[in-house]
Image: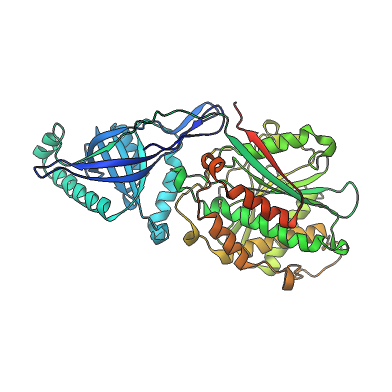
Amino acid sequence: MLETMFKGPGAALALLLCVPVLLVLISPEPVQGHEFTVYRMQQYNLQREKYGCRGVFVQGEARTVEEEVLTRRCVIMRLPDFTLERFHDAVRQTAAAMLILVPANISSVPQHVAQPFMASEPEALLSETLIPVYVAHEDSELLSIYEQTKSASLALRSSAVLQVISMVTANGFQMVAGSDVQIKPINDSAIVTLEGMLPGRGEDLPTIVIVAHYDSFGIAPWLSYGADSNGSGVAVLLELARLFHKLYSDRRTQAGHNILFSLTGGGKFNYQGTKRWIEEHLDHSESSLLHDNVAFVLCLDTLGNGEALHLHVSRPPRPGTVQHAFIQQIEQVVSSCFPSVTFGVVHKKINLGDTALGLMPGSMLVEMGTAGTHPLLWGPAIQETPHLPPRSQMDIRKLRRNTAIVAEALARFMYNFTEKGSLMELQVFKGRLEVQESRLSSLVHWLSSQSRAAQLLERDPGLLPTLELQLSRYLRQVQRHTFLTDKR
């Protein structure tokens, strides 16, 4: 059975397959087989460049990475076996296919095993791969087949005669993937962006835009859970919406800023949802909060781990600007209330003239996260994209701490605490306004319990309506914007 494929970004395709594979043991004994479900590696085009897996159908003898000759063989790897060097070696030798086995319970994977794969996974997707690459969950039968195949590969490696014989004969497991369903690209898939606002007190107020993309990305779309990338950013945004809703519910504590919250799609495909959302606002400038008076755009991403917090800026803010004042407030909050955190500003130069953000006068793009080398808008499509780390790799206490840092810095900036001579240690969000660790945990648990790959979301009946409902609880004028992928 072959699952339907889904359209990806740009002028191209993102192909998603869920294919049962039949492994058949060729031996003097009666033929044995084991059928199981596998998930195909990403395939898509972006800006006329091809990425991911192009091959589909599989037929060949199974071997593990211990064997030196992999040509026309189906390579089986467990997670500890996978390295970029081995991946590229199998591609270079024109292997018939590659099957990567991962535990069904991802949380059981030790950190020292998960991290190397997480680092290699996005790199493996940075180029086109002609051989079929699949991922499957381990079961007892597959592990038994793997161990038998590994023993055979080690035996072959120790004997030059057997290596020669193995090149022209089949003496082990045959891996076969087949289907009667024709593979067809699906074009014009939709990207959905949600927005809502908290209006400040006064007229013609500056607007702070808080953005997080909700989709995830990984080597196989069905396994792309993305707890920290970017379930953490979504959870922080929703908690900020709740906290500032409490302040803005009383006119006496409304600030002189509008706050616009946006959950965008297509974040892993060059931030297409963000780009189209900004362009739509600019096309309706007479009713848009993004026209002339944007203080800054704050993007939230990868906030669930680490002792360092990074603010990435598109250009260094000058002293005396609102952007510089906001950064000062973050520094004050960190130094006075969270001294164990290392905070730094990273300048990553991008050509704002090539992006929709460059059309917003006076705006500054800032991206906050714990990743030290996090690319900004319109950078590589692949970034911090492991499908492996659900909740086990997320530190909820650090997520709560980082949420509190962002919330306190925003409050100090909007209420002019420094100019009013407020104490450095003063905290707004405590008591009934405290950041709720239990709520953050529930949000991350929910977000990371399902794949949020962009190709799947049109078929997901629950994710977007639930996110929209969450925004509607705290914000006004909640709207859904639907865009087709950019054909360029």
**In this picture, residue 23 sits left or right of residue 357:** left
For image coordinates 39% across by 61% down, the residue present is: 108
Count of marks placed on residues: 0
For image coordinates 8% across by 42% down, the residue present is: 28
Which of the two residues, 292 or 45, is positioned nearer the viewer here?
45
Residue 393 appears in the picture as rendered: yes
For image coordinates 85% across by 63% down, the residue present is: 250
For image coordinates 45% across by 28% down, the residue present is: 184
Location of residue 134 by image quarter: top left
Could you tell me residue 121's position as x and y percent?
Answer: 43, 45
**In this picture, residue 155 sits left or right of residue 216:** left
Q: Residue furthest right?
A: 203
Q: From the viewer's perspective, is residue 312 above or below residue 107?
A: above
Quadrant where the N terminus sits is top left
Residue 368 appears in the picture as rendered: no
Location of residue 249 by image quarter: bottom right
Could you tell me residue 139's position as x and y percent?
Answer: 30, 54
**In this picture, residue 114 sits left or right of residue 462:** left
Could you tell me residue 367's position as x and y percent?
Answer: 65, 48
Which of the two residues, 32 or 324, is positioned nearer the viewer here?
32
Q: From the viewer's perspective, is residue 184 above or below residue 144?
A: above
Location of residue 281 by image quarter: top right
Quadrant where the C terminus sits is top right
Could you tell me residue 411's position as x and y percent?
Answer: 77, 61
Q: From the viewer's perspective, is residue 386 above or below residue 272?
A: below
